[in-house]
Amino acid sequence: MLKSIKIVLHICLLYILFQVGNWIEQTFHLFIPGSVIGMIILFILLLIKVINISWIEEGATFMIKHLTFFFIPVTVGIMSYLDLFRGNGIVLVLITIASTLLVMLSAGHVSQWMITRKEAKHD
């Protein structure tokens, strides 16, 4: 029971930051989505230790563990655009594969760079 309440509170804190990001995006008419602004705010607050990682860890872990459930509405919504996929399906598949490979390569390079940097710092 206590763990459930803790998870709900963690998710509420994350949701508040999400809504703050949305408010900033709408108020200042920014081109960056509010959810991304909320993540940047969370990162900054964690970095300067205003928010402790333990305040969000269990809620974030719970949401990541059940991440596939968050894709169900999106997948169902795609059914409205079947005509788009029928006409441009192969192009969309190729773009998806190419962008996935680019993301994987960049993530790998950034990870290697961070590891090298961390090892150099410890030497």
Image (spheres, rainbow, N blue to C red):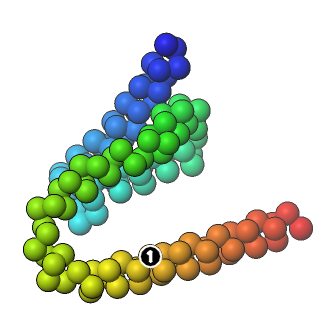
| Quarter of the figure with residue 112 | bottom right
Q: Position of residue 63 (x, y in %)?
A: 44, 40
Q: Position of residue 44 (x, y in %)?
A: 49, 50
Secondary structure at numbered mark 1: helix
Q: Position of residue 45 (x, y in %)?
A: 49, 44
In this picture, is 33 found above or below 55?
below
Which residue: 76% across, 65% down? Answer: 118
The local crowd at label 1, few if under 14, some if 14 to 19, many if 20 or more residues have their Cα within 10 Å, is few
Regarding residue 60, the answer to whether it shows in the image is no
Find disc 1 in the rendering and name its residue: 100
Q: Position of residue 94 (x, y in %)?
A: 34, 85
| Quarter of the figure with residue 85 | bottom left
Foreground residue, 98 or 7? 98
Which residue: 36% across, 44% down? Answer: 69
Residue farthest toward the front in the current orientation of the protein: 86
Which residue: 64% across, 70% down? Answer: 111
Horizontally, is 86 left or right of 8 in the view?
A: left
Residue farthest toward the right in the current orientation of the protein: 123
In this picture, is 47 found above or below 30?
above
Foreground residue, 111 or 94? 94
The residue type indicated by label 1 comes to Thr
